[in-house]
Amino acid sequence: MLYRFIFSSIFLFLRSSGATHQSDMNNNPNEIDERSFYVDYERDTFVMDGVDFRYVAGSFHYFRSLPETWREKLRTLRTGGLNTVDLYIQWSLHNPKENEYVWDGIANITKIIEVAVEEDLYVILRPGPYICAEIDNGGLPYWLFTKYPGIEVRTSDSNFTREVKIWYEKLLPQVTRYLYGNGGNIIMVQIENEYGAFEKCDKPYLNFLKQETEKYTNGKAVLFTVDRPYGNEIECGQIPGVLITTDFGLMSDEEVDAHKDKVRSVQPKGPLVNTEFYTGWLTHWQEPNQRRPAEPLANTLRKMLRDGWNVNFYMYFGGTNFGFWAGANDWGYGKYMADITSYDYDAPMDEAGDPTMKYKIFRDIISEFIDIPELAVPERAMKMVPEPIIMSSVGGILSNNSRMLLGASEIKSDRLLTFEELHQHSGFVLYETTLPKLTRDPSELTINDLRDRAQVYVDEFYVGTLSRENAIKSVPISAGWGSKLSVLVESQGRINFNTLDDYKGILGNVTIQIYNEPFYKVLSDWIITRFPFDDLDKLSNFVATGENTQGVNERGIAMNGPVIFEGDLVHNDAVIHDTYIDMSGWGKGLIFVNGFNLGRYWSVIGPQITLYLPKNLLKQGENKIIVVELQKAPLCRLIKFSETAILDEA
C-alpha cells in the first residue's frame, strides 16, 4: 500500500508539472473521471486527460549505458526541454538463450521506467520485437536461428510468431502497470519497427502483433507504427486502427512538407509525428565518422515544431555497444559493414552523457514552443587521465594449453558448423583440418560465404586474412609451409537492418586448388573449437595461470594466433572519474575491464580509436585490464588514456 501511495503521489505531481502544461495546449473545462491518453484525429492532436498534448522526446537506449548512470542521464535529457523518453526494448538482451530471462542490472526494464517517472518524463515504449537500433540481429535473439534453421523472422512464419507470443507473455505483463491509463507514464507503445523497409508487407503478421499487444495494453496507451516516408513503405507497415508515424533527419523546409504530404496521403487526419529525427547517423569501421551539422538540424527542428509536429530525437543519448552487441549493415563493397563500438551518434548528449553544442541549441528552440524546466544545464563532467599501463603478454589462445585454460570446447565434424549450430552468440570459432599434398605452388585457398572475418594459419603460422567486408575470400598457400590448416573466424556482428538471416561462421565450403579436374578440392574432416569469450572466470584463470609467452614477434605482429595481454590500472584517489582508453598503436581486438567486456576496438583502421570507460566499472586500488589482440601490439606495449573521445581518425 505504501508503494502504491508513493507511486500515485508521483503521478499527481506529474499531472500538475510543466510536462503537461505546454504553451500550445488548449484547456478543456470538462472534468475527467479517469486518466486517459488518446488521439483526436479530427483536431490532429493527442489528448491527455482532456487537455491537448504535444511531446518532444529523446531516444535513450538503457542497454547502452550502465544502470548506475540512468538517473543522471535522464535528468540531463529532461533539462534539455524534453518531456518524454523513447525506450527500445532489446529482446536478445533479456532472453539471451532459450528459456533464459534476464531482468536485472543493465536489463532492468522496470527500473528504467521508474527512473523516468521520478525524473518527470513520459515514456514511449518500443518493444519490437525487432528494433534495429544497430544492435546485433536488430535485437532478435540469435538462438532463433539455432532452434529453427531457415526461420523467416518478421513474418507470419508460425515458428516466429510462436516465439514472439512467448516473449510478449514474459515482457508485457511487467510493464502494464506503467501504462498511462493504468496510472503510469507510458503514453505510447509501438508495433514493429520500420516494417515497410523490410518489404515483406505481411499483413497477417502485423495484425498478429497488434492483437498480442492489445492483450496487454487494452486501450490504456496509444498504439503506433513508424515507417520511412518513401515509396510504399508507410502503406506496407500500416495497421488498421493504429496511428501512423514517420521518421527523417536533416531536411529542407520543402522536404519536411513533402514528408507531411506523404503521411497525409495515407492518414489524412491525426497528429504529425517524427518518431526518429536523426541528430547524427550510424558509423561503420573503415569509414569516416558520420556526423551531422548542428545549425541545419536546428532549422529542421524549428520547422517541425512550428508546423505542429511531435518529435522524438534519435538519438538524444546514444551510448556504447558494450560486449558483442554492435550490429552491421548489408552495405558497401562486400555487402557487409560492421558498426563501431561507440554509439555516440553525434547526439545532443555524447557517449559519456555530457551535453554538446547541439544540446544547447536544441534546448533553446524547444523553449520557443513548449515550457521547459527551469534547471541549470549540467557542465561537462570531469574526466581523468591515468598514467599509461604497460601490458604483459600472457600468451596466444591457439595452443593446446591455452585452449584447455580457456575452456574452449572441441567438436569433430565432416562438415563446417555455424556459430548458431554450435549454440554460440559471438566471439570466435576455429576450424582446423589437414591440407592435401599441394600440386601447385602457390595453391589458392578459398572460403565461400565467410561470415565475417577469418585469420588463416598453416602449421600455426599466419598466412593471411579474409574479409566479408572487403569481399576477399581467397589466400595463396605455398607448398612446403605445412599441412595443418587453421581458420579462426570472427563474428563482427549480425546485420541489423533489412537482411535478417545473418548466420555466422563458414556457410559455404573451403576449397584448395589441385592439378587435376575440377581444379579444386573441398576440404572436410574438421575439428571445430569454440572461443565465445563469454566465460569471464575462465578468461581470468587464463590470465592468472597462462604460459606468459611473448606471443608476438619483434615487430609486435601476432604470427601464431590472437594474443592475450594483461595489466593493472592502479587508482589510489578517493574520487574516480570517467576516462577513455586510447588504443593507438594496437591492432584489432577486445578489451575487458574488471571482467566487463567494453567492446571491440580496431584502432589500426578506425575511425574509432578510444573506448569509453565509465567510472562505475572502476574501483580504488587495482583494476584488471585484459586485451585480446588479433593482429599487432605496439612495441612499447602501452595502453594510454585520453580525456576526450577520439572517433574521427579514419
Image (cartoon, rainbow, N blue to C red):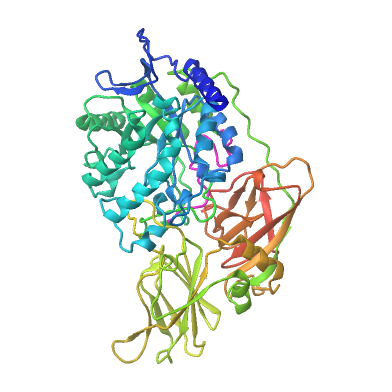
Give the residue displayed 42% in from the left and 38% down from the top: 173
Q: Residue at x 24, y 37 (%)?
A: 239
Residue 300: give x, y in percent of width and height: 38, 29
- Please identify the quarter of the rendering in which residue 635 is found: bottom right
Magenta residues, dominant SS class? loop
- Compared with 610, 485 (above or below) is below
Relative horizontal placement of residue 448, taking residue 205 as reference (left or right) = right
Specify whether residue 302 is painted magenta. no
Region of the chain picked out in magenta, as a range: 338-355
**Residue 19 in the image, given as x and y percentages of width and height:** 47, 20
Q: Viewer-proximal residue, 636 or 221?
A: 221
Of residues 218 and 242, which is closer to you in this image? 218
Asked whether residue 232 appears in the rendered view, the answer is: yes
Quarter assignment of residue 506: bottom left
Residue 142 position by quadrant: bottom left
At 28% across and 39% down in the image, what residue appears?
Answer: 211
Residue 174, horizontal then vertical, whole percent: 45, 38
**Is residue 250 in view from this perspective?**
no
Q: Residue 346 magenta-drawn?
A: yes
| Vertical position of residue 164 compared to residue 294: above or below | below
Residue sitting at the far front: 1
